Image (cartoon, grey):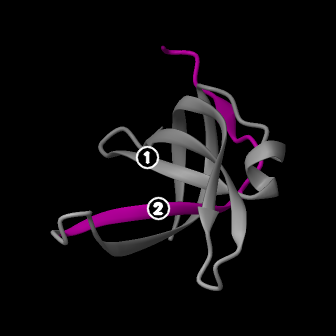
């Protein structure tokens, strides 16, 4: 999906260690953004090198290309859980800066 959204909040870059399916230790890099279109507000993540290089600021109005997916996972008690993950694939150029905040 591609949407024009206002950046509400920019979280810091986070690195998390995980074990991949082959048993290798890896590091996942991400940065979270709270985005709104004036009606809906959502949390989306930028992954990898894009998380470090993305130049976005609170109040920016940008065009975001995103992927939404439902993820199923089990906790330690084997209870089934679901979450909706929104990943930002591409951020367009500044369209304007929202100064009404």
The residue drawn where x is 26% and y is 63% is: 76
Q: Quadrant of residue 49?
A: bottom right
Place of residue 67 in the rendered image (x, y in percent of width and height, measured from the top left): 52, 71
Residue 68 placement, left or right of 75: right
Q: Residues within 10 Å of mark 2 (few under 14, many from 20)?
A: some
Q: Is residue 10 above or below residue 74?
A: above
Tell whether label 1 touches label 2 (CB within 8 Å): yes
| Numbered mark located on residue 58 in the image | none
Q: Is residue 66 above or below residue 40?
A: below
The residue drawn where x is 30% and y is 63% is: 83
The residue drawn where x is 42% and y is 44% is: 37
| Numbered mark located on residue 43 in the image | 1
Q: Nearer the viewer, residue 41 or 37?
A: 41
Place of residue 13 in the rendered image (x, y in percent of width and height, measured from the top left): 69, 38
Kindly report the secondary structure that dominates the magenta region of the rendered protein: strand
Q: Check if residue 93 falls in the magenta segment.
A: yes
The residue drawn where x is 77% and y is 48% is: 93
Q: Check if residue 74 falls in the magenta segment.
A: no
Residue 67 placement, left or right of 57: left
Q: Nearer the viewer, residue 98 or 79?
A: 79
Disc 2: which residue: 86
Q: Residues within 10 Å of mark 1 (few under 14, many from 20)?
A: some
What residue span does the magenta drawing correspond to?
80-101
Place of residue 95 in the rendered image (x, y in percent of width and height, measured from the top left): 70, 41
Q: Nearer the viewer, residue 77 or 65?
A: 77
């Amino acid at each position: 999906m591609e949407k024009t959204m206002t950046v509400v909040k920019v979280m810091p870059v986070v690195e998390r260690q995980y074990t991949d399916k082959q048993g290798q230790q890896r590091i996942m890099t991400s940065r979270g953004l709270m985005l709104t279109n004036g009606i809906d507000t959502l949390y989306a993540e930028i992954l990898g090198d894009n998380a470090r290089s993305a130049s976005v600021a609170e109040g920016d109005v940008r065009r975001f290309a995103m992927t939404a997916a439902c993820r199923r996972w089990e906790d330690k008690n084997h209870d089934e859980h679901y979450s909706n993950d929104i990943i930002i694939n591409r951020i367009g150029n500044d369209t304007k800066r929202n100064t009404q905040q």
